[in-house]
Image (tube, rainbow, N blue to C red):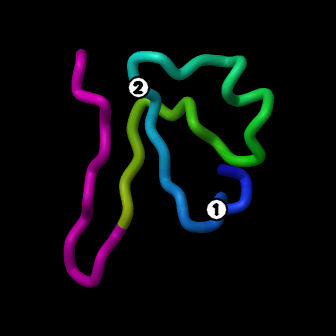
Amino acid sequence: MNDFKTKLICVKGNCDGEVDQMVLDFPVLAVYNNILLKDRRVFMTHGHT
């Protein structure tokens, strides 16, 4: 996944943990994230809480 780190936007899911972050060069433990696409904001979250 590190090869695609400039193309990925991640949020923490069920099985993600600190051990995953230790081997990855980009953040994967965010509880939420968002991006802007033209005139729209896309909010991303796992949705379990």
**As rendered, which of 11 and 14 lies closer to the eye?**
14
The C terminus is located in which quarter? top left
Residue sitting at the far bottom = 38
| SS at badge 2 | loop
Measuring 39% from the left and 17% from the top, which residue is drawn there? Answer: 14
* Residue that numbered label 1 is attached to: 4
| Amino acid at the residue labelled 1 | Phe
10 Å neighbourhood of mark 1: few (<14), some, or many (≥20)? few
In the rendered structure, does residue 39 fall within the stretch colored magenta?
A: yes
Q: Are marks 1 and 2 in contact (CB under 8 Å)?
A: no
Q: Position of residue 25 (x, y in %)?
A: 77, 46
43 horizontally vs 30: left or right:
left
Measuring 38% from the left and 63% from the top, which residue is drawn there? Answer: 35
10 Å neighbourhood of mark 2: few (<14), some, or many (≥20)? some
The mark that comes first in sequence, 1 or 2, is: 1
| Amino acid at the residue labelled 2 | Gly
Q: Position of residue 21 (x, y in %)?
A: 70, 30
In the rendered structure, does residue 47 fall within the stretch colored magenta?
A: yes
Range of magenta residues = 36-49
27 horizontally vs 12: left or right:
right
Q: Is residue 22 above or below residue 25?
A: above
